[in-house]
Amino acid sequence: MIKPLRSYGGVPVLLAHLHRHYDPPDGFTFEINDVSPPIQDGRVNALYSTPSIYTDAKYAADEKWPVKTGDFFPCVLISLYCLGDCAHLTQDHNPLSCNNIYSLVCGLLDYSVSSVVPVCPLLNISYCPPSESLLSNGKSFVVIVYNPLGWKREEVVRIPVSFKEVIVQDHDGREIVSQLLPLTNFSLNTRNYHVRAYLGVSPGNTPSYWLAFSAFVPPLGFSTYIISRANKTDASVTMSAISRPEGGSNNIVEIGQGNLKLHYSAQEGKLVHYSNSRNLVRTSAEQTYSYYSGYEGFDRVNQASGAYVFRPNNTYTIKPEGQVPLTVMRGPVVDEIHQQINAWIYQVTRVYKGTEHAEVEYNIGPIPVDDKVGKEITAKISTALKTNKTFYTDSNGRDFIRRVRDYREDWDLQVNQPIAGNYYPINLGIYAKDEKMELSVLVDRAVGGASLVDGQIELMLHRRLLYDDARGVGEVLNETVCVLKDCKGLMVNGMFYIKIDPLGEGAKWRRTFGQEIYSPLLLAFAEQDENNWLSSHVPTFSAVDSSYSLPKNIAVVTLQELDSGIVLLRLAHLYETGEDKDYSVMSSVELKKLFTGKKMTKVVEMNLSGNQERAEMEKKRLVWKVEGSTAETKITRGGPIDPKKLVVELAPMEIRTFFISVNNLKMFGS
């Protein structure tokens, strides 16, 4: 661990671990009070430039420029590495930011905050002390469910509980349909190990079940639910029906209570077919795991696969260790299929009642490296779609960019890395389509993704490598987690979501559900005796007028009260032009209904960064000449905001930022 420095002045100390026998030149220092003579050499004039200076110089050239609609990917340029080698000595983020200390402090802060505020940051591994308590007579615990989105939503909430005599009620006392799903041995073992690893304590009560129920939550607001322990005869919860189908040659297992049906082969232990009775989508489908063996090397001549470089050597399908038994859990809220793929991959596939997509929860790791081979794990979703080498990936969660395998629109691509060269970063999702259907896959975190085979999408979910890729930090991507002296490779727990739609109908799900993934429901907990908590707290709240919600093509990107009392509001249109026949249109937001009960005294539109009024920015906007165009390119934008009506228009992909003054200091009450 790097010890924190009082200042950045100790240059030799900061840089000593990067290169042996390296000393910076005289005058090279970070100390504000340093008395060393500055570095001077009359033969060289170094001028500091900025993006704005560079832009002004290009504009002054008065030339016509081509229009680029794709994104900008950095390409390998060997001549830049010499400069990069020098620059990384002074700019490496590990010594300058004390990276290890930052991680440690953040971990401690996370734990200290959660010990005061009743939240459950380790809920994904079924650890939530407030919900696991064994309630005595007359006691219950309260679940506060907050919705950060601008539209109302119904979504299944899952919390671990230690007893099966459960009643779930809303704040008005109405019973809510709920379901208990037994916790598997895999889940409990994962929970016990990682709680000790991350919190340094052993978990107390051991929960027995996941409790699942649907929560209805208003826009930008919260709802309250009460979980009570009941007599055996009064408990209204449904215990999941559990089955383990035998692997007969024609034994097909079906899950899904509504329109969506997933069909599994009990003999092969895998998905074989996808169907939706509403939109008549039917196709063969398969989901498997593979890994790339990492290329071995010690320098840039023999380039290794590592933290910064993906360089696979070979591809291997991960074959199950024997027959994969399917464990099926069914109930009124959700159907699940559990699969132990091998000793270090466990998967749960869910179809919730009333939904038309599949949720896949994966647990991968620790990746074995006893064979001295680094591995990069992928999940592959294969269908019969004829996608003609074409697929689409998001760019920073906004535009979807068209990708063509082994092709670049701007230059003739020489294919030297047919796998890595077709991989792209995925923040929101990836999809492919043919003349009839669209296959969409959304993710809950940044991963790599590609379509290396027509009709197939693959995601890279975990990596563990044994060689440094010689890109600056001198570290191998071989992370471990330890309990005392027991150290294991990292395990990842995550989700991806699969949906197949008729051609042209997939955008609605990608955009709407993508926002729900990005802004999940937030849970907080409290314990109450009788009804003392409900009688002293507001059980439900929405910042939005009860008759209003944001249009489904608009999202609140930022809603923040600044120190001055001014509210920073940033709104974004979610759709691209032509992406959807219904939602790729101009849309409007009524600020008066968005902030119900608050009188807005002043609304000023700002630039995207919020540091300059838009009116001032427009005066300085540069008008560029475009190749092949004789007239100024017309871009559709929302009109100016009416100071009386306070209605904001947004065109496709537009983001608008506002400073809002209100008649009281605090935008939201206690």
Image (cartoon, rainbow, N blue to C red):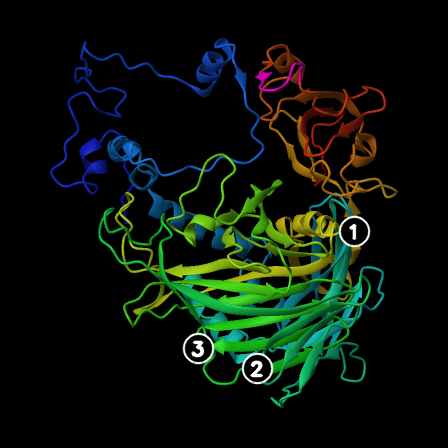
Q: Residues within 10 Å of mark 3 (few under 14, many from 20)?
A: few
Residue 664 horizontal/vertical position (percent): 74, 27
Residue 608 horizontal/vertical position (percent): 61, 26
Number of marks in the rendered image: 3
Mark 3 lies on a secondary structure that is loop
Q: Residues within 10 Å of mark 1 (few under 14, many from 20)?
A: some
Q: Which secondary structure type mostly characterizes the magenta part of the structure?
A: loop
**Mark 1 or mark 3: which is in front?**
3
1 or 3: tag closer to the N-terminus = 3
Residue 343, which numbered label?
Answer: 3
**Mark 1 or mark 2: which is in front?**
2
- The residue under the point 19% across, 11% down is 43
Answer whether residue 626 is magenta in the image.
Answer: yes
Is residue 27 found left or right of 70 in the rendered image? left
Foreground pick, 477 / 503: 503
1 or 2: tag closer to the N-terminus = 2
Answer whether residue 10 is magenta in the image.
Answer: no
Is residue 329 found left or right of 389 in the rendered image? right
Boundaries of the magenta span: 625-632
Q: Which residue is mark 1?
A: 540
> Hey, which quadrant is residue 543 in on the image?
top right
**Mark 3 or mark 2: which is in front?**
2
Mark 1 lies on a secondary structure that is loop
- The residue under the point 21% across, 37% down is 15
3 or 2: tag closer to the N-terminus = 2
Q: Which residue is mark 2?
A: 268
Kind of residue at badge 2 = Glu
Residue 414 horizontal/vertical position (percent): 40, 44
